Amino acid sequence: MSGRIAFGFMKGSLTQKLKSMAVPIANRRRYCSSSASDTATSKPNLPPSSRMGRLLTGTVIGLVGGAYASTMDEATFSGWLFSATKIANPLFALLDPEVAHRLAISAAARGLVPKEKRPDQEILGLEVWGRRFSNPIGLSAGFDKNGEAVEGLLGLGFGFVEVGSVTPLPQEGNPKPRMFRLRDQGAIINRCGFNGDGIAVVAKRLEAQHELKHGGKMGPGILGVNIGKNKTSEDAAADYVQGVHSLSQYADYLVINVSSPNTPGLRQLQGRNQLKDLVQKVKAARDEMQWGKEGPPPLLVKIAPDLSKQDLEDIAAVALDLSLDGLIISNTTISRPEVVQINPMSKESGGLSGKPLFSLSNDILKDMYILTKGKIPLIGCGGVSSGEDAYKKIRAGATLVQLYSAFAYGGPALIPQIKEELAHCLKRDGFKSVYEAVGVDCRIAFRFVKECLTQKLKSMAAPIATRRHFTSSSSTSAAKPNLPHSSRKGRLLTGSTIGLVIAGGAYASTVDEATFGYLILITLGMGFL
């Protein structure tokens, strides 16, 4: 009932605003004479027909606009508001990137953004970690660093919103300017450096939002909390543990950020031993807390796209060994793809996000899906600007998808557009849910390689005796070739190899597709095929 009242109030306010537009322009601006004794007010020198035309035009706009708004249902009105936000995009583009970002956060925090009233399509819904997501499209960390606008951002229609990175102590971050637009490439470079209000302030905000949500005064939506370390901290693990103790009770999932390129030494925590030690300490801190029936929030790690194959293998091993709940792939890149090098801004230091990151992050995503054998939910992040992009992330192995740069450029109207396009892609290719499409590109590749290898193994298994027959002139005895010792030794090695290949093929036929793909990668690396 309160929602209908609010909606009615909004329509009424809009109607009044539209009607107020009908006030003649002559009444908005007065021209006073310089003489104090002159009591007459001069008006613009407009012919009567022009003034009458303005009056009639304003009146028509007010009446028609007000009447139209009063006839809309909530869903239609919501869609109209999202479309109307496109008007603001060129205005934001004129502002400094960080100023524009600050204004966007303030608007969302104060409810000055449209609220999605249209339900998500059923095909987009999914359950991950025992939590229900209305759709797989989320807002990545870095946009709402301090948890100021969670309710407003979720109201835009995101399936989940991730705040942070949050550090124990407040810090200013790196010197300004530190955000740069590469508009022609649809990219952003930032070197902010974990600027934020600190755990104590953010915890109070999240606590208030937590109470609203559980009191039924806030709409549904999943909240992720991304935690980091202070720039001057000498004990990184202690910083992350403090984040867990202070913020995890408000989070639907937690993220350990070890991949920002703008905090010195942070990416070194992605090394196998360092990451293993850090994850063990953070998990222990989380598990020692008191939890209700839902249990502790899932724990994820966010990794960089600038990693070697060995780094990826090490991270995958740690994730599987320590039963991590998920990985976010990926953070910004310090590389500069050729497509951005023509832009003078590309020479700025910092992490690159946006469209140029899409291909690189997708390659890492596919690798990690294979290395983790499809057993760990992955969040695909990097370069998503359309529903088709989100769909490609899902096919590459992502269960959920995040965006940032495209949202900064496209504004709220981009969110329903991406969801609609994603639903279309799923239906077009015959999928009934997001789950069915997760990792499908990797699985298709597995099946193709598996079939090729199976055929090759079968052809190699044909007995050598059937290829070459040695018959004697006598019908009762068969002459054997007079082979030297080295040739007999070669036959022995060949036979042994064939036996191993057959055994390997038999084993391969028993494993799942993800494990088989991992075996193929190892085999290819050894130069066997």
Image (cartoon, helix red, strand yellow):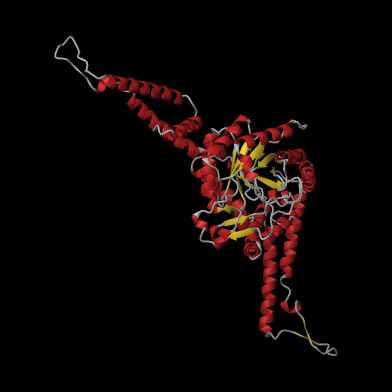
* In the displayed structure image, the side of residue 370 where residue 176 appears, left or right: right
Look at the picture and state if 156 lies above or below 492.
below
Task: Work out whether residue 70 or residue 95 is closer to the camera in this orientation and state it.
Answer: 95
Quadrant in the picture for the C terminus: top left
Image quadrant of residue 302? top right
Residue at 69%, 80% in the rendered image: 52
Question: Against 145, is 326 above or below?
Answer: above
Number of numbered discs present?
A: 0
Query: What's the residue at 28%, 22% (across, down)?
Result: 487
Q: Is residue 357 visible?
A: yes
Residue 97 versus residue 276 in the image, above or below: below
Rendered image quadrant of residue 160? top right
Residue 214 in the figure: left or right of residue 104: right
Q: Quick check: 173 left or right of 436? A: right
Kindly give the residue lying farthest to the front in the view shown.
485
Image coords of residue 21 (percent x, y): 71, 70
**Residue 188 horizontal/vertical position (percent):** 60, 56
User: Residue 463 appears at what percent x and percent y?
Assistant: 30, 21
- Position of 108 relative to 362 (above/below): below
User: Looking at this rendering, what residue extends furthest in the right direction?
Assistant: 37
- Nearer to the camera, 48 or 134: 134
Instruction: Examine the rendering and report whether any part of residue 432 can be seen.
Output: no
Residue 401: horizontal and vertical position, in percent?
59, 44
Point 54% across, 36% down: residue: 313
Between 143 and 167, the one nearer to me in the picture: 167
Residue occupying the point 51% across, 44% down:
363
